[in-house]
Amino acid sequence: MLKIVHLDSSSLPKHIPIPRPNIEHEWVAYEATDPQQTLERLQGADVAVTNKVVIDKALMQQLPQLKLIAVTATGTNNVDLEAAKALGISVKNVAGYSSVCVPEHVLGMIFALKHSLMGWYRDQLTDRWVENKQFCYFDYPLTDVRNSVIGIFGKGNLGTEVGRLASVVGMKVLYAEHKDATTCRDGYTPFNEVLAQADFVTLHCPLTPTTQNLINAETLALMKKGAFLINTGRGPLVDENALVAALKSGHLGGAAIDVMIKEPPEKGNVVMEAAKVLPNLLVTPHIAWAADSAVEILVGKVRDNIEQFAATLK
C-alpha cells in the first residue's frame, strides 16, 4: 500500500479536490507545510504531492522510502531534479492544463490596460462620477486594442494561444527571438526589435538562468514609450524595482502582473505598494491558471501520474 502525503492542499481550491487514485493507498493531506515540518510529514511516504513546498537534496537523502514527487503544477523549481534522478526518485509534473484560462486572463488584462478600467473603477469608490458636472469625464487614456502590436516572449502552448486570441481581436502578433541570439528563426522577430515595436509585451517563457530578470532597467528602456507589460509567467522574469520605476517615470503606459518574485509578496513589496496608488498597475494573485476547468484537468492528471507510477512498481 502506497502512503501518499499532500503537503499543501490549500494551494488548490477546496471545491475541486484531487480524485483519489484507484490503487490501494493511504492519503494524508496538510493544508500547508512549513520548511521545518516537511521532513517529519514525509517520513514513511512513498509519494509526496506538492505545489510549492521545496523538496531539496538534503531532504530527499533523509527519505529512503520516497519514490515519487507529484507536482500539482507545471513548474518544478521547488524540486532538485538532479538529486531526485540520482536518488532514483521520479518527478511528475502537469503541463497544458491552463491553455484556455491563462490566455483569456492575458486578453482580459490587455483590454483592462487599454481601456484604463482600473482607474475608472477606483474613481467610483470616491464618488468621482457622482460629483461630476457632465455625464462623463476623461481622466484616463482610452484607446483601441485593434491594430496594437503584441510582442510575445515564449512560443509554447500558452504563448501560441495568446497569439491566436490577439490576432482574432485585430492585433499584430510578434514572437520574440531569444535575447542575444545570433540568428533569428522563421516565425520570430529579433528580441530588441520586438521591444521597440510592441505596444504590449507579454511573458510566457520558462524561468531559467538566462531568462531571470529578462525584463530589467535596460530592456524596459528599449520598450517604446507608453507600452504595456504583462507577466503571467514567472515572477523572477521581471525586476520589480525597475518595473515600478518605469511606471512612475511614465515610460511604461501600464502593467498587469499575476506573478511575483516571492509569493505571497511581503508587506511593503515595491509592486504592491505601487499598486495602491498607480491606476495603470493591475495585480492579480497568481490566479490566471485557476479556472475551474483548468483545475479539474490538473487534479485529474495528478491522479493519473500517481496511478501510472504505481503500475510500474508491480
Image (spheres, grey):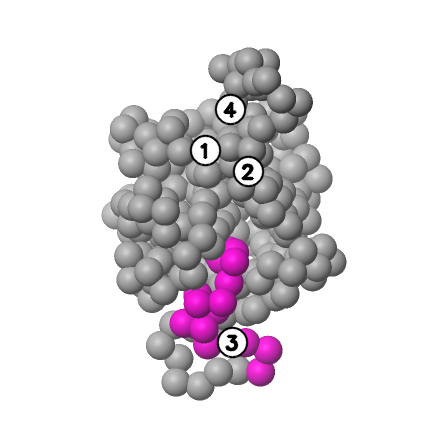
What is the C-alpha distance between the residues marked 2 and 1? 8 Å
Instruction: Look at mark 2 in the image and give the residue it sits on.
Output: 116
At horizontal 37% and vertical 52% (from top left) the residue drawn is: 251
Q: Is residue 188 above or below residue 87?
A: below
Q: Quarter of the image containing the C terminus?
A: bottom right
At horizontal 45% and vertical 73% (from top left) the residue drawn is: 193
At horizontal 39% and vertical 42% (from top left) the residue drawn is: 260
**Where does residue 221 sit, x and y in percent of width and height?**
33, 60
How crowded is the residue under tag 4: few (<14 C-alpha within 10 Å), some, or many (20+)?
few
Please name the amino acid that badge 3 sits on: Thr
Q: Is residue 18 above or below residue 125?
A: below
Is disc 1 in contact with disc 4, using a CB cutoff of under 8 Å? yes
Q: Closer to the camera, 212 or 62? A: 212
Label placed on residue 122: 4
How crowded is the residue under tag 2: few (<14 C-alpha within 10 Å), some, or many (20+)?
many
**Where does residue 125 sit, x and y in percent of width and height?**
52, 16
Label placed on residue 279: 1
Is disc 3 in contact with disc 1, using a CB cutoff of under 8 Å? no
Which residue is situated farthest in the bottom direction here?
A: 183
Please name the amino acid that badge 1 sits on: Pro
Q: Nearer the viewer, mark 3 or mark 4?
A: 4
Q: Quarter of the image containing the N terminus?
A: top right
Q: Earlier in the sequence, mark 2 or mark 3?
A: 2
Residue 201 is covered by the magenta coloring:
yes
Please give the range of residues in magenta. 186-204
What is the C-alpha distance between the residues marked 4 and 2? 10 Å
